[in-house]
Amino acid sequence: GEITELAGCDYLTISPNLLEELYNSKDEVPTKLHADGASSLNIEKKSYINDEALFRFDFNEEQMAVEKLREGISKFAADAVTLK
């Protein structure tokens, strides 16, 4: 479900159980995300290279980003303990 919807996205961290599920699946996994389509969108480009304060402010304004990062770090740490 969720993982196959991100087909075409580079550099994903996928849990071992989902990797095994994908490995054992016989279902087609067509590419859903294409770089060509993204580059044609009119999205404001921002750079935080020289402005960490602005990055932190903008990041903290996005509650979902804050929560998902927290959740991801917690689950990653729990998985690391499990895999030891």
Image: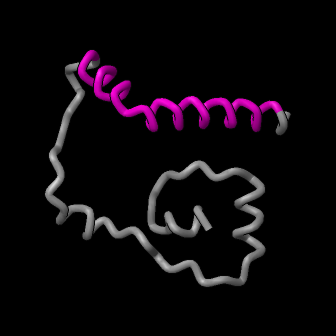
Quadrant, the N terminus? bottom right
Q: Is the magenta stretch mostly helix, strand or loop?
A: helix
Left or right of residue 12: residue 46: left
Left or right of residue 71: residue 48: left
User: Relative to the observer, which residue lies in front, 63 or 18?
Assistant: 63
Q: Based on the displayed image, in which of its 4 quarters is residue 62 positioned?
A: top left
Seen at 52% across and 68% down, the residue is 5
> Total marks drawn?
0
| Position of 73 relative to 45 (above/below) | above
| Position of 44 relative to 73 (above/below) | below
Residue 77 sits inside the magenta stretch: yes
Left or right of residue 82: residue 8: left
Farthest top residue in view: 53
Quadrant, the C terminus? top right
Seen at 83% across and 39% down, the residue is 83
x then y, percent, for residue 28? 60, 84
Q: Based on the displayed image, in which of its 4 quarters is residue 24 positioned?
A: bottom right
Magenta span = 53-81
| Position of 12 relative to 5 (above/below) | above
x then y, percent, for residue 78? 76, 32
Q: Based on the displayed image, in which of its 4 quarters is residue 64 positioned?
A: top left
Residue 54 sits inside the magenta stretch: yes
Seen at 71% across and 30% down, the residue is 77
Seen at 66% across and 30% down, the residue is 74
x then y, percent, for residue 67? 52, 32
The colour scheme used here is one colour
x then y, percent, for residue 2? 58, 62
